[in-house]
Amino acid sequence: MSDLTTEEQTNVRTALRFLRLQSGGWKTLAKALHCDGKQLCKVGAGRGVTASLAFRVARLAGVPVDDVLAGRYPGEGTCPYCGHREEVIS
């Protein structure tokens, strides 16, 4: 059971997938977040997200935790699976 809503947990998982790509894998990301790699993989696959993990993700990303919980990180137009970001033409 988690203190976070289903939507917030989904948003944290999206941020985790993006950070996994940036860091080079679950194992490297787990080290950066100071957590167990196997547990982190399970969270990425759908297990409950804790508030503590949400704060760790925000700290690592350098963004407010509200941005992670609300889905504003990794940013609009960024694919959470491959990290590709659409260029905005003005």
Image (cartoon, rainbow, N blue to C red):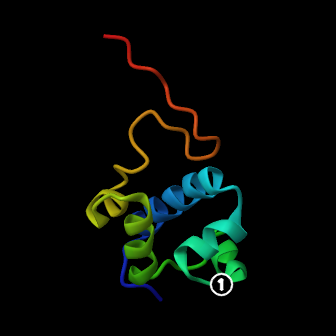
Q: Identify which amino acid the numbered label 1 is placed on.
A: Asp
At horizontal 66% and vertical 82% (from top left) the residue drawn is: 39
Q: Which residue is mark 1?
A: 36
At horizontal 59% and vertical 56% (from top left) the residue drawn is: 17
Label 1 sits on a secondary structure element that is loop
Name the residue furthest top.
Answer: 90
Q: Position of residue 79 (x, y in %)?
A: 55, 39
Q: Position of residue 62 (x, y in %)?
A: 36, 59
User: Could one spot residue 16 in this view of the protein?
Assistant: yes
- Residue 2 appears left or right of 37: left
Name the residue furthest bottom.
Answer: 1
Along the line of sight, which residue is nearer the eye, 11 or 65?
Answer: 65
Where 51 falls versus 86 (above or below)? below
> Which quadrant holds residue 82?
top right
At horizontal 39% and vertical 51% (from top left) the residue drawn is: 73
> The C terminus appears in which quarter of the rendering?
top left
User: Could one spot residue 43 in this view of the protein?
Assistant: no
The residue carrying pointer 1 sits among few (fewer than 14), some (14 to 19) or many (20 or more) residues within 10 Å by Cα, namely few
Q: How many marks?
A: 1
- Residue 71 appears left or right of 32: left
- Residue 85 appears left or right of 43: left
> Which quadrant holds residue 67?
bottom left
> Which quadrant holds residue 89?
top left
Where 71 falls versus 35 (above or below)? above
At horizontal 45% and vertical 20% (from top left) the residue drawn is: 87
Q: Position of residue 66 (x, y in %)?
A: 27, 63
